[in-house]
């Protein structure tokens, strides 16, 4: 027996086991690490909505909506995701576990979604199962599915939208509805899949603006297919060229008549930047980058040549390469793993196809028995994921003081225990979740969207107005303070040294003599 045939009953059983594995890896120790970065924004915003019905950040320090909120524009972002979190807060306490559980649930959905997308693209249950398994143990997937951010939801929505978009272009309409059949015969578009793509596109767009990247992937695919059709028939009049032309006209019309809407997206682009760090983010799920790249190439070849699905191979490959190219050369963003995570689904499908293709070639060449074939497949799969991540000192399950993220929970727990009525706190007020109920006056630092910057003069005034105070700054907070502030703190205040205050964070106090 050279290959293994599995039934749908066996397929669903194995998929269920994969989902259980993925869910366990995501739910386990969900609150072990403290909130970091923008998790605070979503926490404050979601809890504020659960208490007031308005998208206004909650001030846990005083137990009321924030009186001044410099992050108001962010409260209106990704409300489709944060609304789900807010609903949990109506009957469950606002803990890290509860807040992050929505992301975990979307991670579990993603396992099923990538199985469906891989099967729709390759028509192979085996490839779909391998892709689902790779995502279940994916480092990127586990990290973002355990984080209070919309990326866990955006990942499957973008993948589903892209898959429906392809199906609308390349699948034959076999239904009996005259209108749908007429549109298919005239335009070559499967209207059912097109409608589904539109619905998921809108939902994904409300989740994250990077949904617009799909338009560029689609444009590149249309260009490739238009030229292929021209070479085959020597005619430009084909559905790919027509759709591309309509897309260009639509873009021009949008720029002319909806300029504000157009600028909101165009403003995020910059030409010929060099953000090659995104490549390492795409490849960090795998044991060795070169091995992953070879499997992706083999997977694309196998789908196109051995499975005779060249269009699917083009779509999967371009759905990975187009966003990656844009991230490297066009995006006006700080380099971040979250900005390319949504495209990694297509890399996983290519790798899964590469594993299956290599396995099939081995089975055919050596005419393996079923038992040996299973062993070979297991070995091939084990050699792919980056299992070493789970043994690192700092990861999504555990982070020590040597990690890159401060343990704000410990730091502010120490502050709450030690602070007195005459204190003022100088820090990023968005982190007030961890000094909940302290009712301490806070001088809020500036950040990337605020014009305010903490200066030496501000500190001198605070030390004059308040008898005692605390300054708590993480390493990246120093990007948003004035020149000389760090030296001023070292010369004029007492640096706190305690087991609770370690890592990439500085804590200073003063007492007026």
Image (cartoon, rainbow, N blue to C red):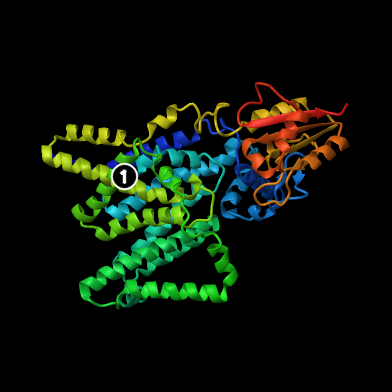
Left or right of residue 25, residue 83 in this image? right
Q: Nearer the viewer, residue 509 or 76?
A: 509
Taking the image as drawn, is residue 173 in sight? no
Residue drawn at point x = 72 percent, y = 34 percent: 487
Whether 508 is drawn above or below 141: the answer is: above
Q: Look at the picture and state if 314 lies above or below 33.
A: below
Decide: few, some or many residues near mark 1? Use Cα within 10 Å; few <14, some 14-19, many ≥20: some
Which residue: 42% across, 63% down? 216
Task: Tell me the residue at 31%/40% (across/down).
Answer: 290
Left or right for 344, reference 334: left
Q: Please, is residue 132 above or below residue 303 in the view?
A: above
Q: Secondary structure at mark 1?
A: helix
Q: How far from the left and from the top, in percent, is residue 168?
A: 35, 65
Please identify the quadrant where the C terminus is shown: top right
Residue 218 % position (x, y): 39, 63
Q: Which residue is mark 1?
A: 293
- Give whichever of 77, 401 is nearer the camera: 401
**Image location of residue 445, percent across then percent down:** 72, 43
Q: Using the rendered view, name the quadrant where residue 283 is placed.
A: top left
Say whether residue 260 is visible: yes
Residue at x-position 28% and y-position 53%: 122
Asked if residue 433 lies left or right of residue 32, the reply is right
Look at the image and tell me in which quarter the N terminus lies. top left
């Amino acid at each position: 027996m050279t290959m293994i045939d599995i039934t749908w009953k066996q397929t669903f059983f194995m998929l269920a086991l994969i989902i259980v594995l993925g869910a366990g890896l995501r739910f386990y120790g969900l609150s072990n690490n403290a909130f970091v970065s923008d998790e605070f924004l979503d926490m404050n915003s979601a809890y504020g909505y659960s208490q007031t019905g308005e998208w206004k950040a909650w001030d846990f320090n005083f137990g009321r909506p924030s009186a001044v909120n410099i992050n108001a524009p962010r409260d209106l972002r990704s409300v489709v995701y944060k609304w789900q979190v807010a609903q949990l807060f109506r009957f469950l306490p606002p803990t890290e576990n509860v807040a992050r559980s929505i992301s975990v649930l979307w991670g579990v959905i993603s396992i099923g979604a990538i199985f469906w997308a891989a099967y729709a693209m390759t028509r192979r249950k085996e490839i779909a199962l391998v892709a689902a398994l790779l995502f279940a143990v994916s480092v990127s997937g586990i990290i973002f599915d355990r984080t209070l951010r919309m990326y866990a939801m955006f990942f499957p929505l973008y993948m589903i939208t892209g898959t429906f978009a392809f199906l609308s272009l390349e699948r034959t309409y076999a239904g009996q509805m005259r209108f749908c059949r007429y549109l298919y015969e005239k335009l070559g578009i499967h209207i059912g899949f097109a409608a589904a793509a539109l619905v998921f596109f809108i939902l994904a767009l409300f989740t994250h603006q990077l949904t617009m990247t799909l338009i560029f992937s689609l444009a590149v695919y249309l260009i490739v297919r238009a030229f292929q059709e021209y070479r085959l028939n020597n005619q430009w009049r084909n559905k790919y060229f027509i759709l591309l032309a309509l897309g260009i006209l639509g873009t021009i019309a949008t720029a002319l008549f909806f300029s504000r809407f157009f600028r909101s997206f165009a403003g995020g682009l910059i030409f010929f930047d060099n953000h090659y760090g995104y490549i390492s983010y795409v490849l960090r799920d795998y044991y060795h980058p070169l091995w992953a790249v070879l499997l992706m190439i083999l997977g694309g070849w196998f789908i196109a040549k051995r499975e005779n699905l060249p269009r699917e191979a083009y779509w999967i490959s371009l759905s990975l390469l187009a966003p990656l190219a844009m991230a490297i050369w066009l995006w006006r963003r700080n380099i971040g793993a979250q900005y390319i995570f949504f495209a990694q689904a297509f890399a996983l499908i290519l790798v899964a196809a590469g594993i299956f293709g290599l396995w099939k070639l081995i089975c055919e060449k050596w005419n393996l028995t079923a038992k040996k074939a299973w062993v070979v497949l297991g070995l091939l799969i084990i050699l792919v994921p980056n299992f070493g991540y789970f043994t690192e000192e700092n990861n999504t399950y555990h982070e020590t003081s040597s990690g890159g993220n401060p343990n704000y929970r410990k730091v502010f727990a120490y502050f709450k225990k030690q602070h007195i009525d005459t204190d003022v706190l100088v820090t990023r007020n968005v982190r007030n979740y961890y000094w909940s109920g302290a009712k301490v006056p806070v001088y809020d630092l500036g950040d990337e969207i605020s014009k305010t910057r903490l200066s030496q003069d501000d500190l001198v005034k605070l030390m004059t107005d308040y008898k005692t105070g605390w300054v708590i700054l993480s390493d990246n907070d120093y990007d948003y303070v004035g020149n000389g502030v760090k030296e001023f703190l070292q010369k004029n205040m007492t640096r706190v040294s305690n087991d609770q205050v370690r890592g990439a964070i500085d804590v200073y106090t003063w007492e007026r003599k």
